[in-house]
Structures are given as structure tokens and as C-alpha cells.
Image: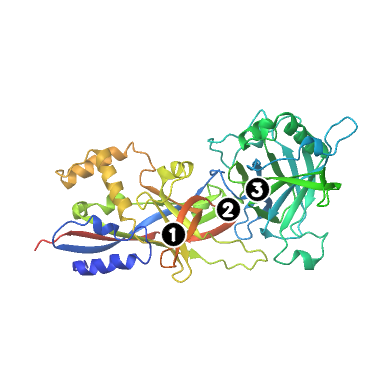
């Protein structure tokens, strides 16, 4: 039975949405017809399916290293990365005449190492892992402005005889130190890669002979050190997350004490892998037979998995939404709530479930990430998992549906003067050759970064700064899938006949 509500009831619904999603509140009210208005709620079933994703944009400020198996989905994920190092503005070595030199007057560098610092990890801290570190080629530089994806081929950036080629084993837990040192909050976990002193010697020689190479990161990367490939080569059971790496140069030099006496002291200069330069994560996923593309959508649910693995596609039945009398109605509210299945299997190392999802039109995904866009509440929306309602809720996607309707009319040549039969014929003719993704949306796990600032009244204001693909480990099952449609709750408004 249709239930027609008074306009104040619709206002109450729209007002309630402001608490759900600040970005979409009241959008429906902006497109309601003027005058006395009636509203009609209606629910539509929408189909969803899982999409296997080969690769996503690899730009990140956080890198991942290791190999693990998802205990629930049994997907084996391997991750390693390529990273450049940044020259800080204050980078300098002591004057050459103050450095310790050999009998030939050449500067002596004592040693060099790279340290991968990390706080977060997944899996078994005692698992033995293997890594190979190689310097990249100065003939094949990772360049700014190029969009690299997680299926990039490291061989494209490696030469035949890299200046650094080192293999080592490591574990998350440093067994060389006592527990009371490594288990405290003051200890910063790290993996140290010791390089030959000749590598530091080469950097020092270039510093004194070609100081222009050290003026900025571009010159340093193109003439001194193009970066390194940190490759996972063996081991299973852990994956570390690093947002900070340093390359340290150690040396000795002459100076004077406070009393004016000559002395020799130890020195160290550090270069860091930061957001000012490129860090690219490479990811490979091996799927069990049950998750192969030809099998995955036989399930009464869909999947989300990161990194670069499984997304959920949503099919909007737009022609049904605007059929009949609804063609001339305004869509004032459209709410989509998606529940997930809680993990039930007991495991020693449970994998996290995605916390933030991006809902976006499928044909907008590439540009959204490559151009570093933010959700606009028109073609893209964010939702975080509600621990109280137990849903990912997109409170109002009415503007998106209205824009899709307008685009459909323009593409099919439909005008307001057309009757129902004419509109239907035009739609059917256009749909025969239309892009099959024209009415598809994608649900994508993302990492949303915020800038926090205090307001005039002392409150905390969180401003969305960036949205990137989630490259950390996560997985979940969502309501939907084969023969199990989701519900799209729509409220139409129209001018009252009275």
C-alpha cells in the first residue's frame, strides 16, 4: 500500500540523515519540486557481485613487506616495494679537509646501512622471512607524474649489475635483544640492512666532486641513488607495515673540543624515504579455486579484500527507479545500508575487516585515484563501519541517481514531452549498444587521511585530506551476492494534486 507523507515528515527524515552523513545531508531537499509536496517511499532490490581486481594505484606513504595467507579466504598475499630516498634541505657532510682520509687523500666512510622502521605488523613475529635488496638503475628512474600500479614489474627499474645486491633473513621480533627491551613502547622495531662501506664511499666521493647532485631529491635520484627494490624472496607468516625508512652514512671527522684541542668524532648523516619521493608497493595474490573468477559469484554474499584483490560491484536498476509515474518525481532520498558477516572461524591471527568504504560510479574509479580526488557526494561517497548499527551506511545517494537519470535521458535522446512508450523505446535502443558499466557502482576499501585542527570553540575539526586504496591487509563478506539482493530505500517527492 502506498503511504503518502506530509512534507514535514520528509523534513524529519532528511534532518535525521544529517547525523548519518554530513556530506550528503539535505541533498534531496535541494531537488524537491516547489509547492505543496507529497512523498512516497519505495524499496528496490539491487544485485551485487564480487569483482577480482588485478591491480590498483600503487602510490602510497606506507609500504608492506612479507607474505601471509588469509585464514578465512585462504588467499596468499605477497607484498614488497620500491622506494626512493629524499635529500633534506639541510643535508651536508663535513668539509673534506676535516674528514678522515687514507694515504691517497681519499675520504674514508666507515659504513652504511638501510633501516626499515615499523610499529605495525600482521602474523607470527617469530616467522623467518627472507629479503633481497637491490639498488635500482639510474637508467630506468621511477619518475614523478607517472601512475604506477601494484602489478608493476620491478625488472623495469633494475639494471644488470646493481651497486647493491644483498640478501638477508629477518623476523619481526628481534631475538638478539632481551624481551624487556623489545616489548616496551619505547623500542621502535626495525630491520637493518648493512651495506658495504664502498657504497657510502661512492656517495661521499660524488658529494665532494659534484655537490650539485645533492641540491635536491631530483638531482640525487637521477645522479647518485635512484632507490632500492626491497623484494620478499622467502618465508610465510608475517607482513610488516612501514611508513619510515632511513639510509644512514657513518664516518669520522676532525673537530675541536671546547678547550680548543683537536679530536676525532663519529658522524652520521641520514636520508629518509618520505612522501616527497616515490614509494611503490608491488602486490601479488594467489587465490584458491573457490575464489577464482568463474566460481566466486556462486555465493550468497560478496567479498571485500585488500590489498588489490576483491571489490564489490553494485548494479543500480535505474530504468526501474524512474519507470511509470516516477519519471516525473524527484528522488529526495536514497539510502543504502550494507551489513557484513562477522568472522566466525577461530584463528590465531585474525585479519582486520575494512573500516572505510568508497562508493563510486564504476567509470569514475580510475580518474578518482589517479587525480587524487575527494568524495563529492555526487559521483562518490564515503562510509565508515558503524559499530552500533553494524552497517556501512550511505545515507543519501539521491544526487548520484538523479545525475544518472539525466545522463541516461541525454544519451537516449529522451525529452520531457515523451510519453512512457516513447521513453521506453528510446531507452531500449540506446541500451543495446551502451557501455555495460553505465549503471554500475563499486564498493572499494580505502584509507582516508584527515587533517585535525582545533576550532574557535576548542572543538576538534577533522578535514579529509586524501583517499587512497587500502593497501593493508583486510577482508570481509558482505550481504548480497547470488539470489540475495540488497535493499535500496528511495523516497520520491512530487507536487500534490490538491
Q: Which mark identifies residue 290?
A: 2
Residue 128, given in percent of the width and then of the height, sits at: 78, 54
Q: Quadrant of residue 416?
A: top left
Residue that label 3 marks: 79
| Quadrant of image for the N terminus | bottom left
- Residue at the (67%, 32%) spot, across then down: 213
Cα distance, mark 1 to mark 3?
Answer: 27 Å
Question: Residue 490 at what x, y percent from top left?
Answer: 29, 60
Reading the image, the residue beneath label 1 is: 383
- Is residue 480 in sight in this rendering? no
**In the picture, residue 414 is in which quadrant?**
top left
- The residue under the point 48% across, 41% down is 370
Local SS, label 1: strand
Extreme residue toward the front, this view: 259
Looking at this rendering, what residue extends furthest in the right direction?
A: 103
Mark 3 packing: few (<14 Cα in 10 Å), some, or many (20+)? many
Instruction: Mark 1: give few (<14), some (14-19) or many (20+) Cα within 10 Å.
Output: many
- As displayed, is residue 10 above or below residue 412? below
Q: Position of residue 17 (x, y in %)?
A: 33, 65
Judge depth for marks 3 and 2 and give the one in front.
3
**Depth check: 466 or 257 in front?**
257
Q: Residue at x 34, y 65 (%)?
A: 18
Q: In this orientation, which residue lies closer to the viewer: 73 or 464?
A: 464
Amino acid at each position: 500500500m502506498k503511504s503518502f507523507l506530509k512534507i514535514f515528515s520528509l523534513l524529519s527524515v532528511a534532518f535525521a540523515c544529517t547525523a548519518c552523513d554530513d556530506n550528503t545531508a539535505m541533498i534531496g531537499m535541494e531537488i524537491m519540486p516547489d509547492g505543496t509536496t507529497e512523498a512516497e517511499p519505495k524499496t528496490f532490490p539491487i544485485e551485487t557481485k564480487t569483482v577480482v581486481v588485478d591491480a590498483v594505484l600503487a602510490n602510497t606513504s606506507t609500504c608492506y613487506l612479507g607474505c601471509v595467507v588469509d585464514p578465512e579466504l585462504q588467499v596468499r598475499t605477497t607484498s614488497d616495494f620500491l622506494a626512493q630516498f629524499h635529500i633534506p634541505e639541510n643535508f651536508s657532510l663535513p668539509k673534506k679537509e676535516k674528514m678522515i682520509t687514507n694515504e691517497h687523500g681519499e675520504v674514508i666512510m666507515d659504513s652504511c646501512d638501510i633501516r626499515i622502521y615499523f610499529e605495525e605488523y600482521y602474523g607470527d613475529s617469530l616467522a623467518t622471512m627472507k629479503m633481497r635488496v637491490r639498488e635500482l638503475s639510474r637508467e630506468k628512474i621511477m619518475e614523478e607524474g607517472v601512475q604506477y600500479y601494484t602489478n608493476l614489474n620491478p625488472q623495469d627499474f633494475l639494471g644488470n649489475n646493481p651497486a647493491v645486491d644483498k640478501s638477508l633473513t629477518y623476523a619481526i621480533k628481534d631475538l638478539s635483544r632481551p624481551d624487556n627491551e623489545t616489548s616496551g613502547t619505547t623500542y621502535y622495531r626495525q630491520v637493518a640492512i648493512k651495506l658495504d662501506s664502498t657504497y657510502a664511499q661512492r656517495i661521499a666521493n660524488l658529494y665532494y666532486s659534484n655537490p650539485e647532485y645533492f641540491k635536491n631529491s631530483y638531482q640525487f635520484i637521477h645522479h647518485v641513488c635512484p632507490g632500492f627494490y626491497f623484494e620478499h624472496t622467502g618465508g610465510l607468516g608475517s607482513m610488516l607495515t612501514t611508513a619510515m625508512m632511513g639510509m644512514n652514512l657513518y664516518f669520522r671527522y676532525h673537530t675541536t673540543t671546547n678547550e680548543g684541542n683537536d679530536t676525532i668524532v663519529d658522524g652520521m648523516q641520514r636520508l629518509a624515504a618520505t612522501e616527497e619521493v616515490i614509494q611503490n608497493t608491488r602486490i601479488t595474490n594467489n587465490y584458491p579455486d573457490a575464489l577464482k573468477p568463474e566460481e566466486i559469484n556462486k555465493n550468497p554474499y560478496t567479498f571485500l579484500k585488500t590489498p588489490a584483490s576483491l571489490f564489490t560491484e553494485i548494479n543500480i536498476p535505474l530504468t526501474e527507479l524512474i519507470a511509470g509515474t516516477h519519471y516525473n518525481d524527484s528522488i529526495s532520498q536514497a539510502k543504502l545500508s550494507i551489513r557484513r558477516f562477522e568472522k566466525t572461524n577461530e584463528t590465531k591471527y585474525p585479519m582486520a575487516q575494512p573500516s572505510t568504504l568508497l562508493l563510486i560510479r564504476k567509470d569514475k574509479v580510475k580518474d578518482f585515484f589517479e587525480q587524487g580526488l575527494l568524495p563529492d557526494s555526487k559521483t562518490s561517497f564515503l562510509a565508515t563501519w558503524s559499530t552500533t548499527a553494524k552497517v556501512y551506511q550511505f545515507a543519501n545517494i539521491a544526487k548520484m541517481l538523479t545525475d544518472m537519470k539525466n545522463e541516461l535521458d541525454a544519451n537516449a535522446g529522451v525529452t520531457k514531452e515523451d510519453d512512457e512508450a516513447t521513453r521506453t523505446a528510446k531507452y531500449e535502443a540506446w541500451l543495446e549498444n551502451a557501455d555495460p558499466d553505465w549503471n554500475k557502482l563499486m564498493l572499494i576499501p580505502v584509507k582516508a587521511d584527515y587533517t585535525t585542527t582545533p576550532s574557535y570553540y576548542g572543538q576538534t575539526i577533522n578535514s579529509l585530506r586524501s583517499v587512497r586504496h587500502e593497501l593493508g591487509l583486510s577482508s570481509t563478506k558482505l550481504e548480497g551476492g547470488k539470489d540475495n539482493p540488497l535493499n535500496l530505500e528511495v523516497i520520491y517527492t512530487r507536487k500534490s494534486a490538491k
